[in-house]
Image: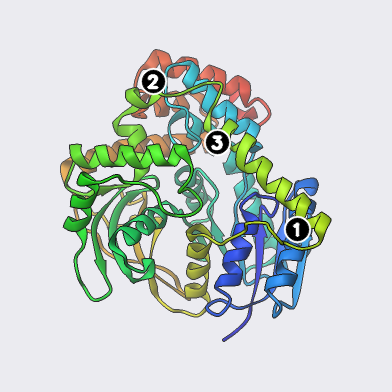
Amino acid sequence: MKNSKLTIVGGGSTYTLGILMSLIEESNQFPLSQIILYDTDESRQEKIGKASKILLKEHYSSLEKFDYTTNQAVAFKDADIIFVQIRTGGLLMREKDEQIPIKHGVVGQETCGPGGMAYGLRSISDMIQLVKDIRSINKDAWILNYTNPAAIVGLALDKAFPDDYKLLNICDMPIAIMKTYADILNEDIWNLDADYFGLNHFGWFTKIKNKTGHDYTSELKNYIRNNEFNPTDKLIANDPSWQSTFKQAKQMLEDFDEYLPNTYLQYYLYPNELSRKENINNTRARQVINGRERNVFEDCDTIIKQNNTNNIDISGDIHGIYMIRIAASLIYHLREKFIVMTRNNGIIPNLPKDALVEIPALIGKYGIEPLQVGEIPTFYKGLLENQYAYEKLVVEAYFENDYNKLLQALVLNRTVVDTNKAKGILKDLSDANREYWPQFLE
């Protein structure tokens, strides 16, 4: 089995240590000879990098090389596969993305609604330039992008690089939900097989089976209706915000019981209810800044000071393992089944061909081999067409420098709808993003 060379872009992320631990846990399935962390933020990169070096020395003795850098040539030149997890504007801009819609009585969320639009517009430029930079140095590396908001970023990348089959856009939310399903069923997560359709953060599981063909779908629905439905993936299990989100998924199933919903649908199906629960002074971004962000960097300081990871809780999670297993399936042509994003092209015949749908596919050395979904019922088709129109308008607005299309997008978005609200939100978001949206300020 070939040992691969991996680069993680956004190496200064608070998720990096967990991804490294997942790589350690999966080293038999996806052995590496080299790991390089790359980030444009030197101070964050250095702190995460120093702690990572200690972690890998303790737990990954077979790794031949580790480095962290802000030099693209060092980071990209020899990589077989590149993970991308950037956050343009950082958490402080995320906080504005969430606060501004809340001020207007609308859901404030980093990937959905106006906040997702703002974050997406900031991310597109950096992501396009990053892919160009990677390809100028390394033509053949697989690029696995899980930068949020994946729907908007992925659609923009598909437009900018339509023929780059080695560029994949991936979200871990379906597998995080499936982890909870697996624990409910006392099944190994990797023994479950899901049928799914939708757009990113906007989809439904139509069937959950195990690899022997046993259908668990009705059993899961009955369990969720009659019991508490809480997340079990260690990354989110103890998070009150995620616990509330999974409870809302139970409500979605009670109201629309045909399929098992992606948890993010709550923002589109109950926007008024969720907006009333928002606290402008305690957004999700603020909770992350005061919680995860602070805790991870304090852990890094401790690891660096004591020169070991003793008494520091670092563990892999389904988020990292999912990316790693997709990487292994690409490198070793395993053709295993994963839920990924890809251009529709008739996979769902009654949706637009150019939509970036999220569906099951086989993953191998030729990239994504999508599995046919077929036509979907009118209710779901209508929701998805509306959401795709919003996403497409945002991407068109970026490429065409068209402010009016941003307004149209927000009016279409189910979290907003009202034109006067959309105007006010767009004005405030534009003011907050002057550094990032220069094309819309003329």
Query: Badge 1, how many Cα within 10 Å: few under 14, some, many 20+?
Result: many
Q: Is residue 396 above or below residue 12?
A: above
Could you tell which of marks 3 and 2 lies nearer the N-terminus?
3
Residue type marked 1: Ala
> Which mark is drawn over residue 119?
3
Under mark 2, the amino acid is: Arg
Front disc: 1 or 3: 1
Q: Residue at x 62, y 48 (%)?
A: 86
Which x, y percent locates residue 46?
80, 53
Secondary element type, mark 2: helix
Instruction: Using a 10 Å C-alpha cutoff, classify the residue at mark 2 as few (fewer than 14 neighbours), some (14 to 19) or many (20 or more).
Output: few
Q: Could you tell me which quadrant the N terminus lies in?
A: bottom right
Q: Residue at x 23, y 38 (%)?
A: 382
State how far apart marks 3 and 2 are (Cα): 22 Å
Evaluate if marks 3 and 2 touch, with contact meaning CB atoms under 8 Å apart.
Answer: no
The residue carrying mark 1 is 51
Q: Which residue is mark 2?
A: 276
